[in-house]
Image (spheres, rainbow, N blue to C red):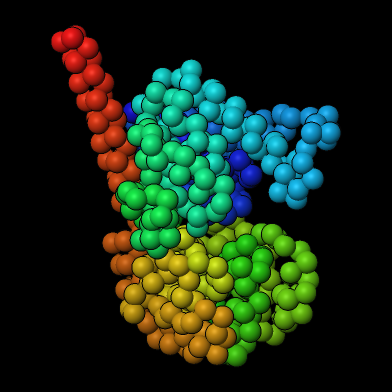
Amino acid sequence: MKIAIIAHLKFPIAEPFAGGLEMLTHVLAKKLGQKGHQVDVYACSGSDMDLNIVEINVKGVDCESTKDITPDHESFNDEFMQTHHAYLDIMLQLQDKNYDIIHNNSLHYIPISMARTIDTPMVTTIHVPPFAFMQSATLLAQKHPNNHYISISEHVAETWYDYIKESEIIYNGVDTDFWSYQPKVEGDNAVWFGRICPEKAPHLALKAARKSNTFLYLAGNMSNQEYFDKEVAPLLDDRYNCFLGHLKQEQMRDYFHKASVFLFTSMWEEPYGLVLAESLSCGTPVAAFKSGASPEIITSKTGRIVEKGNVDQLASAITACKKLDRKDCRQRAIDFCDIDLMIDNYEDHFQRLIFQEKSKKRISTTSKKAV
């Protein structure tokens, strides 16, 4: 297959990954390429050139020259203008390319809205709740058969049902060879990884770990400095925890191998949570808030799920998780979270859509000849 992947343009598709979406885009392109498919990734500068990157200029608009026509609205800012035109550029480029399938892995409304202008099936993976701009795009696209959707969890499919009636569910996956199994750990440590921001709530992980008398290693990219200074920094204490900054995946894996439990404290409805799968793959049980898809991933053998925001319950879950068998966590990852399973499902879905498209064209051609 000849596949175009439209990436999220906010961050490069390269390590250290800004988040799970960037990592997922990278591994999807890499694995599909290894299976013999031609894969082009439309992404911003700084992306991994080992992939077939079609570099998109996200700074293509001189916003200063448009100040007189820019509405005075906080959401209609320079970033909005730049990304809007960057995705327009991608869709215009795709009109001239002979791809078999287009995979929209961005979080933007333009590809969904413009899919009808391209004579190629487009599959959009839904990674987020129904944000307003994307709601509008999916409603406009309902009358056009060129849009197809994948939801990354049952939770996502349910939250989007008012706008997308049909979507294939393909759970995200991780490389279980890379996120290797560590059967035993020394010491009594916990880990937390994620973006440093209020919705990921690392401050609650720090409080729960201290309450359970468990040392916590905390790491992530600085998404909200003000929040860090106000809520996280006052809780940092070398006796109880350590802030490691933004880690590469190899470093994250090493800390999973050292940890007896991983803490998942997302305060928003997490669509999936790749870090859950990474933790389980390493054999590390998860103490988690009930957030979005977490109950779909974590079982009673692999972790404990507690009410969102409840520090006391989370502290008790930390203690309970230390008693779980790491082999069960690893097996769950292999059975449910393996990247090869995800890739096989995407490959099968793409091939079915391509076959359907070719069948429709053959029927159309035959009908015209008959007339």
- Residue 114, compared with residue 327, is above or below; it is above
Q: Residue at x 70, y 37 (%)?
A: 81
- Measuring 37% from the left and 67% from the top, which residue is drawn there? 297
Taking the spot 69% from the left edge, 59% from the top edge, the residue there is 223
The quarter of the rendered structure image containing the N terminus is top left
Above or below, 349 relative to 1: below
Q: Place residue 323 in its image quadrant.
A: bottom left
Q: Position of residue 236 (x, y in %)?
A: 72, 79
Measured as percent of width and height from the top left, residue 130 is found at 50, 55
Residue at the spot 63% in from the left edge and 84% down from the top edge: 207
Residue 33 seen in render: no
Q: How many marks?
A: 0
- Residue 297 appears anywhere in the view: yes
In the image, residue 29 sits, relative to residue 211, either above or below, namely above
The foreground one among 315 and 181 is 315
Image spot of residue 231 (x, y percent): 73, 76
Q: Give the camera-side residue of 140 and 35.
A: 140
Q: Horizontal placement of 273 versus 205: left or right?
A: left
Quadrant location of the C terminus in the rendered image: top left
Quadrant for residue 161, please give it.
bottom left
Q: Residue furthest left?
A: 370
Query: Where does the image place residue 53, in percent across and percent down from the top left?
Result: 55, 31
User: Residue 146 sits in which quadrant?
Assistant: top left
